[in-house]
Image: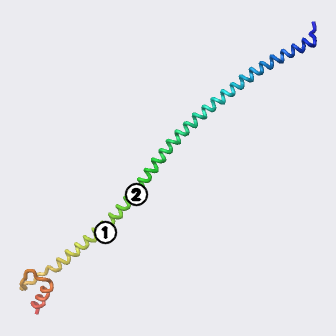
Amino acid sequence: MSLSDSDEDNSVSNILSIFKRDLKIKMKKWADDVYSEIDDMVKSLHNEVKEIKNEQKQMNARITKLERELKASTELKTSVSKIETKERRTEKKLEEIEENGKHTRNLMRSNNLVIFGLPEIPNENPMQQQHEVEQFHY
C-alpha cells in the first residue's frame, strides 16, 4: 500500500504541526525557566543592594561617631596643651618666688648685725642706723 502524495503531504504536515507544537511548548518552558532564573537573580541582587545600603548606613554612622570623637580628642589635646603651658608658667613663677624668698632670707640675715655698745632705738630706719654706726665707729 502506497501513500498518495496528498496523504504523504498530510503526514508531513501533521509531523511538522506536532513538531511545531512541541517546539512551542519546549520554548515556552525554556523561556519560563529563563524568566524564573532572571527573576531569582533580580531578587537576589535586590537583597544584596539592600544589605549594602544597610552596611553603608552603619559605616556612615561609625564615620560620624569617629569624626565627633576626633574633634573631641583634638579639643582635649588643645586643652591639655594650654594646661601644660600654664603649668610651665606657674612652675617658672614658683621657681622665681622661691629664688626671691631665698634672696630675701639672705638679705634679712645680712642685716642682722649685732654691734655691742650701740643702743637699739625702736622704729629706727636703715639710714638712721647707718648714721649711728658711723658715729659709733669714730
In the shown orientation, is residue 116 left or right of residue 72?
left
Rate crowding at label 1 as few (under 14), some (14 to 19) or many (20 or more) other CA atoms within 10 Å.
few
Dot 1: what SS? helix
Q: How is the image coloured?
A: rainbow
> Quarter holding the C terminus?
bottom left
Which disc number belongs to residue 77? Answer: 2
Q: Residue at x 93, y 11 (%)?
A: 4
Position of residue 96 measured from the top left corner of the image (x, y, whole percent):
28, 71
Position of residue 99 measured from the top left corner of the image (x, y, whole percent):
26, 72
Q: Quadrant of residue 109?
A: bottom left
Q: Residue at x 7, y 84 (%)?
A: 116
> Quarter holding the N terminus?
top right
70 up-or-down from 121: above or below: above
Q: Amino acid at mark 2?
A: Lys
Q: Residue at x 52, y 39 (%)?
A: 54
Which disc number belongs to residue 92? Answer: 1
Q: Amino acid at mark 1?
A: Lys
Dot 2: what SS? helix
Q: Residue lying farthest bottom?
A: 138
Position of residue 50 measured from the top left corner of the image (x, y, whole percent):
55, 36
How many numbered circles are shown?
2
Whichever of labels 1 and 2 marks the residue nearer the N terminus, that label is 2
66 up-or-down from 134: above or below: above
